Amino acid sequence: MQSTEEPVATEDDPRRVLGGFIRAQRQIANLSLRQLSALTEISNPYLSQVERGLHEPSIRVLKSIADALNVSAEILFEQAGLISGPEKLGDEATESAIRADQRLTEAQRHALLGVYRSYLETNRQGS
């Protein structure tokens, strides 16, 4: 007889790592699970299961979560093991580091991201 239960995710399971990363980004964005559910149009129970590492979300779901959390989809794809990380620090890594820095307030993180992005845009236009 086959079991219909989900396999239990271990601490180093990629699904649990991804779920923990999503939870941390949601908390940094000061969003409840219900608020994230509303922004992504993904059910609250499913998002909860993703955060606990019980489901492996599709690319569409990851993209929707990334958009709602204002993080690069590539970062979530990397966390999910769908792509390899860049060998050098790039825009995504810098923005992720700013978002993850608990020493900054939410307002400071938003301001810093805005300044950083404006510098990048200025440099792109000047090239």
Image (cartoon, rainbow, N blue to C red):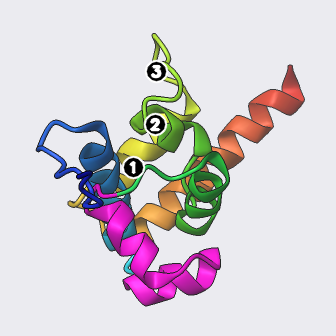
Q: Residues within 10 Å of mark 3 (few under 14, many from 20)?
A: some
Picture disc at residue 6: none
Q: Secondary structure at mark 3?
A: loop
Q: Secondary structure at mark 1?
A: helix
Task: Provide residue 75's location: percent of width, then percent of height.
Answer: 50, 39
Quadrant for residue 34, please give it.
bottom left
Residues tagged 1 and 2 counted as in contact (Cβ below 8 A) = yes
Residues tagged 3 and 2 counted as in contact (Cβ below 8 A) = no
- What residue is at 43 percent from the left and 49 percent from the top? 56
Q: Is residue 69 above or below residue 37?
A: above
In the figure, is residue 7 to the left or right of 65? left
Task: Provide residue 95's location: percent of width, then percent of height.
Answer: 49, 44
Q: Residues within 10 Å of mark 1 (few under 14, many from 20)?
A: some
Q: Is residue 43 magenta?
A: yes
Q: Secondary structure at mark 2?
A: helix
Q: Look at label 2 and name its amino acid.
A: Thr
Q: Look at label 1 and name its amino acid.
A: Ile
In the figure, is residue 114 to the left or right of 44? right
Quadrant for residue 45, please give it.
bottom left
Q: Which of disc 2 and disc 3 is earlier in sequence?
A: 3
- The magenta span reads 32-54
Cα gap from disc 1 to disc 2, whole angstroms: 6 Å
Q: In the rendered image, which residue does mark 2 sit on?
A: 94
Cα gap from disc 3 to disc 2, whole angstroms: 13 Å
Q: In the rendered image, which residue does mark 1 sit on?
A: 98
Q: Look at label 3 and name its amino acid.
A: Gly
- What residue is at 21 percent from the left and 60 percent from the top? 103
Q: Which of disc 3 and disc 1 is earlier in sequence?
A: 3
Q: Is residue 52 magenta?
A: yes
Q: How many marks?
A: 3
Q: In the rendered image, which residue does mark 3 sit on?
A: 85
- What residue is at 22 percent from the left and 60 percent from the top? 102
